[in-house]
Image (cartoon, rainbow, N blue to C red):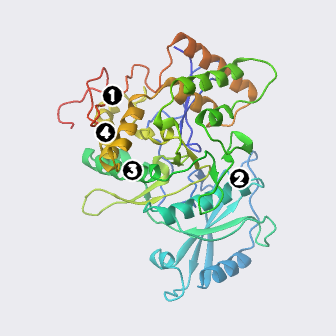
Amino acid sequence: MLNWAVWQRRRSGALVVLVTDNGNNQNNNHNHNYKPPHSTANAAMSSCSSSGDSYRSDEPPELDIDLDKLMKRASDALNARCTAATKLTRGGSHEVFTLEFEEAPDAAPPSLVQAGFSCIARFSRLNDTRERSVSEIATARYLKRRTSIPVPEIYYYDLDPDNGIGAPLVLMERMPRRHLSSFWDNLSLDGKKSVLSQIAAMIVQLASLKFNQIGSLEDENGSVGPVISPCLNPPKGPFHSTAEYMRSFIPSSPTVGPLQQAGTAIEQFLAHNSQAYTQPPFCLIHADFDAQNMLFLESPDGSAPVLTGLIDFECAFTGPLYFLYEYPIFIQDVSWSPELYPENAVLRPHFVKAIYDALPDREAQSTFVACINNKSFELNCFRNAFMCVKCSENTLASSAKHYMQELQAGTGLAYQGRLDFTPERYTEAADPLPCNTGTVQPGLS
């Protein structure tokens, strides 16, 4: 088998498969379920954060925020006097503050009142994030208008770096709940099933949003513009086909090397495997649909947690159902956590059935089952190698070489976290068929 480096890259939210220059397997998380530092508040729609006080030499310097101007701007925007601003955390792209306000229930937004007169102020640390921030805000507001998915309300934004406060600013609802990643491991099997059913309901709502092009939202009315991705600089598109979209991640070159071969291979694969789940209409896809971006309220009586928030819409995009209809990373098997195999083998069919039961009609159900039953090395590993993490052209070329070797040998796996894994297959009614892996232990059902 090919020597892939498997990264659980928290910024992209994908199980990213890359080839290292020395060909060695590297794994930066020995525990399948990554646990970020505990937080009870959304870190301003971004989970890649650090609460340490010291700034490293290889990261952007600390922002010089004028707190008085920030508090004055927040007071005017939210119709309540801001009384305090406290730095909460920072990530690779943002610094995050919590703002506190005097109680003004008759004038302030209802969500500010519900949050105890507290909100989030997020500042961009980088100078090239305006397009990304515009699309993130548009996506959150679009979802707020079109679905019942709980997303933070955007109160106000000023993306001008010279706004007088110190950096581009977004004020948003504070959602004081726990990240699923902080307590997933401690849930009972029934608790995990309940959580997955709620995640499935979000996926069904995202699938219901229809678009004719692949790209990133430009406004809250759902206009689609170029794809905003860390791997595309500048943004490209919008695109009318999945093949055109995926090929755009391959750098153009006058010579035909492994990268160009990989681009041609994905176009040919899609041309010969055209299915409803790769064709328009396209749906809305969260680019980091993982446990650290899902907020839940735990019940003191021990009953199942309740979904209260989905955060971090950076690089969200409209795309094919194929990339929406996927198992959450935390119920996919990985070789360093074999003790989770039996439980995951119960949770995956439950998740599939929950989506199937929530879909609106037989056509949608049939498309979903076909998609789950036909997960492929060609699409999954092309995405993981070329579409998730910004890499040097040498690394991309190395990944393309190994991708083509696996493709030509017919040895590539759709899911590479566990080399002996055979994905479950399902009947037309989404009931699991017998498979070679994922044995269920007695007592698990």
Amino acid carrying mark 2 in the image? Tyr
Q: Mark 3 and 1 residues: CB-CB less than 8 Å, in contact? A: no
Q: Which residue corresponds to mark 2?
A: 55
- Crowding around mark 4 (Cα neighbors within 10 Å: few <14, some 14 to 19, many 20+) is many
Amino acid carrying mark 3 in the image? Ile
Q: Is residue 249 above or below residue 67?
A: above
Amino acid carrying mark 1 in the image? Arg
The circle on residue 425 is 1
Q: Residue at the location (68% across, 20% down)?
A: 398
- Crowding around mark 1 (Cα neighbors within 10 Å: few <14, some 14 to 19, many 20+) is some
Q: Quadrant of the C terminus?
A: top left
Question: In this rendering, would 389 be left or right of 367?
Answer: right
Residue 417 appears at what percent x and percent y?
A: 46, 27
| Alpha carbons under labels 2 and 3: distance apart | 36 Å
Tell me which label, 2 or 4, sits earlier in the chain: 2
Q: Nearer the viewer, residue 416 or 254?
A: 254
| Alpha carbons under labels 4 and 3: distance apart | 12 Å
Quarter of the image holding residue 387?
A: top right
Q: Is residue 414 above or below residue 83?
A: above
Tell me which label, 2 or 1, sits earlier in the chain: 2
Q: Mark 2 and 4 residues: CB-CB less than 8 Å, in contact? A: no
Q: Nearer the viewer, mark 2 or mark 4?
A: 4
Q: Is residue 141 above or below residue 191?
A: below
Q: Which residue corresponds to mark 3?
A: 199
Q: Which residue corresponds to mark 4?
A: 347
| Alpha carbons under labels 2 and 1: distance apart | 48 Å
Secondary structure, mark 3, is: helix
